[in-house]
Amino acid sequence: MQLASPGRLTPLGRVALVSTVELPTEVASILLSGTRVAKGDVVARLDPTNLKRILEQKEATARDAEREADASRAALELAELALADYEQGASLVERNAALGAIQQAEAELTAAVARQERTKRALERSARLAEERGKSATAADLVAELDLEDRAAAADLAVGKARHALEQAQTRRDVLERLGRPLHLRRLQVELTKARAGAEAGKRAFDRAVGEADAIRRQMEACTIRSPIDGVVADAGITEMGRAADGHSDRLSFSAAPGQPVAFVQAPDGRLVFEGEVPEEQASLIRAGQPAQVTVRSGMINRPIPGVVDRVVISADPASAGGLGSRTAQVRVAISEIPPPGSMQGQGGRATATLEVATPEATLNVPRAALVWYDGAYHVGVPGADGAVAWREVEPGLADAETVEIRSGLAAGEAVVADPAPHLSADQLRRISIAPPPADSKLPPPPSMGRGFQ
């Protein structure tokens, strides 16, 4: 007998050529489906016009950022030199100048005090001499005395001025030590910190601008899409198009979004597998190694393609409310023949596999409604010659919407009660109600058995 399984053809060794450009880009040229390529051959070219315009903007931004970074570095160097100069030069000069002024003022004060003392002693000697002469003092003596008094007054004034100059020099030194030098030093340090932050910000801006320009250059390189393997171009999105001198199709009018495949490259061996489904009850009839015929829905292939069943896997999904038989088995068929390059173009891989399987042996089937679950097993009612119904434990097998295969517990030719509800005792109804079939049972309970099933 034959089983039909709808499904899809999936190439093995099929590589997608994806656009890695980060914005939709027009496809400038692309090889036609069915073209054989070697690893590294150009399969498609994307139009880099928009990227070139963006690159020009990024490069201009990078140049501006470089100039600003250079200016920031120069300002930093000046701030570093100003601080070092003040700490190691100007600051010491100011301090030494203040100390020198104090020393000069002290020397002048010492000289003024000495002159004051000499004048004072001379004035005292003159007074004693005048007292000794008495009335015999001449006019010259009086003039000399007046001159000494003027000299003493001038010496007193010079001492006061020298002492004031010393106090001023000391004050200037104290102000320089307590306020002037720390304040100026702090101001230079703040300027240095600002210059350093500006230089770092300028460098970051420059590095970011250069990185963005480099990223656009890489995007432009990605506009040339090459084959990563030896193979055949497939699903290039073009069925008929003129060729340019370099072998690529031209006059294109479609764009590739980021991450979108623009074409595929099929491995040179062109291997395909068919993946489809069959109802679960048919899965036991299919074995690995069985021959199969796969029909492709394409006008380019007008005959079935031979293949061999590779594997059969029962779906892990639980049975739906429709009951047994709603689950499916996954069937994979390895295609024995390589279809012509491009023959699958535009077909989406849709196909149907026809499998030749042995006709199953005759089975013993009973109506689904005849089965009753209690005491952890399924039972059927077998009427005796006297009309009494004997309950027989059975093992169910495959089932469909109407009947169930009985694998053991019932002999061929034995009759069963099609409607067991009227023949169930109260005790059986109780056992049915307290222990219904498990949730993972292959068979759901009968539709209705009276009050015991409510």
Image (tube, rainbow, N blue to C red):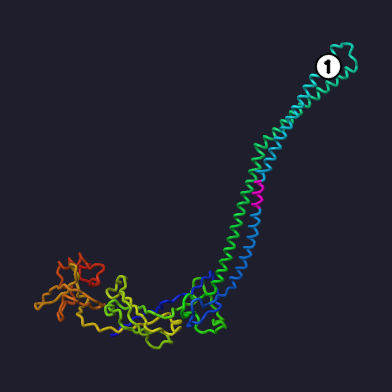
> Is there any visible trace of residue 328 in the rendered image?
no
Q: Secondary structure at mark 1?
A: helix
Q: Along the line of sight, which residue is nearer the eye, 34 or 104?
A: 104
Residue 157 lies, with reference to residue 222, above or below; the image says above
For the stretch drawn in magenta, the main secondary structure is helix
**Count of marks, rendered view:** 1
Q: Furthest residue to the left? A: 386
Q: Amino acid at mark 1?
A: Ser
Q: Is residue 10 left or right of residue 142?
A: left
On the picture, is 70 further left or further right than 157?
Answer: left
Q: Position of residue 145 (x, y in %)?
A: 85, 18
Residue extending furthest toward the bottom = 302
Residue of label 1: 126
In the foreground, 93 or 19? 93
| Picture quadrant where residue 108 is located | top right
Residue at the spot 44% in from the left edge and 78% down from the top edge: 267
Relative image position of residue 278 (x, y in whole percent): 32, 78
Q: Is residue 24 shown in magenta?
A: no
- Residue 192: image x %, image y %? 63, 48
The magenta region covers 75-84
